[in-house]
Image: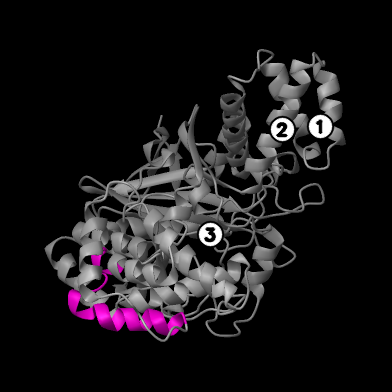
Amino acid sequence: MDVQQAVTKLAAYALAAGLIEKEDIIYIANGLLKEMAMDSWNGTKEEVILCAEEMQSAEEGSIEDGSLLEELLNALTDDAVLRGLAGGESSVYRDLFDTRLMGVLTPRPSQIIRKFRSLYAENPKCATDWFYAFSCRTNDIRKSRVNRDLKWKTATEYGELDITINRSKPEKDPKAIAAAGRAKAAGYPKCALCPENEGYAGRLDHPARENHRIIPLLIGGEPWGFQYSPYVYYNEHCIVLNDRHVPMKIEGKTFERLFDFVQQFPHYFVGSNADLPIVGGSILSHDHFQGGRYTFAMEKASVEQALSFRDFPDVSAGILKWPMSVIRISGENTERLSELAGRILTAWRSYTDESAFVFAWTKGEPHSTVTPIARKREDLFELDLVLRNNITTEEHPLGVFHPHADLHHIKKENIGLIEVMGLAVLPARLEQEMEKLKDAVLSAKNSGVANEEILSVLRADPVLSKHADWAGELLKTHPEINSENIDEILKAGIGETFVRVLEDAGVFKRTPEGKRAFLRFIRAAGGEFVL
């Protein structure tokens, strides 16, 4: 389509998606002309209205899946690149430019806040349903890209784990994450989570956010914001962010804040990444939570060992059947749950058990914290406390309780909140690497090459060498591997590797010795195993 036609159709999209009213059409068309450095528009208001009606009734290329919006933005951005308006042709420049276009179509924050609060007064779920759809329609959530992520489930002894190969977000190195957490706040906005991102035009080292909107909330009596993640790893993946640029910190108030959010949005879970490098999330410099409407495998996990805590007879507690070390507490009173969680956290922060290689401190640095997740289950509130420790050694420089080196070919990044709950977020590189691995294995198999010779071929390849030992194990386990079953075998192998990733991250291992070590900590925290 030509540029004039694309302008008309993008204005029609805005009308069909409910971003503008009919009275806004001329104003919006002129705003798009300004960004496109065009002097005139040959469309009409009536043409936009008719086009919008057709979009609303279309079955393919619909408003909801993001494909129509992607097509229109690509047409306009292609033209802008050719005429030098975008500043460059790379994906970074293109994203900066097409977000400018969406900024023209996106209503102001005050309008969005009024709408959200009006719907919330009717029902919290109605409010989040609308705001999530809005965030997709404004391309704040790039739905067309998210839809291209590879996703599958893997059956394990811990339930069905979710596996995702993320095509739209680069892999992060744990050392870079730690360095960012230590860095002093600088620039504007100070980080990707600051409220100042709302409406920000972006730059080469910071994403554009003209189409980004935040709903103000009071959490624990303090100002926080509510938004959706642009990557939506799971359904309605939201971010709850502190209005102030303050570092991540897990403390007694954290549990109170989590429960406050769940009380306001009982259909959502909410959790926090840990507040230390290696075991924390990718942004440690800004206090925030993540939540949403999705049932993870960890939520379905059963209590494997019941616990009791003195002074808390009104709280049910237990250790989950999960590859990581998780204490679940539940009850009707969130204040009592927060109090017990605070006691467990305090005990864990100072707990050392050399026989289990658990050290609270070394060389003045703290090592222990928790990853907490809160939810409401029918009439009870529930809090999972995942015990974390970030100690390192020469053998494991990225962390003893972190994916070990033999698993880095699949997963090297920090094991944050999302992975803890049973959803693997794996780097985009794996897609091409697995395709190349599949081709190499099948080619060798079809030529009658023995498994050992296949491994030699893989080890000699600069891309596949890191996968060679893993592939060798798959070949031993699945001698029947062929073109019809190799995809499922590779997927299952990646899923099994993710189980090992979580087991590496578990502080108390699922062995008799690990169970005894877990009991020693439970007693130090004022609890007992219930026989």
Q: Where is residue 206 in the image (x, y as percent from the top left)?
A: 57, 75
Residue in view at x 61 percent, y 45 percent = 505
312 to 120, vertically: above or below:
above
Instruction: Tell me how far mark 2 sits from mark 3, CA to CA.
Output: 35 Å
| Alpha-carbon span between mark 3 and mark 1 | 37 Å
Kindly identify the amino acid type of the residue bearing the numbered disc 2. Answer: Leu
Callout 1–callout 2 Cβ contact below 8 Å = yes
> Type of residue at label 1?
Leu
Q: Which residue is drawn at 44% across and 48% down?
A: 147
How would you classify the magenta stretch by its main secondary structure?
Answer: helix
Give amino acid for label 3: Ala
- Work out which residue is located at the far front of the displayed protein and give it: 42
Residue 76 falls left or right of residue 106: right
**Residue at label 1?**
458
Write the residue at 62% across / 34% down: 497
Q: What stretch is highlighted in magenta?
A: 14-36
Q: In which quarter of the image is residue 139?
A: bottom left
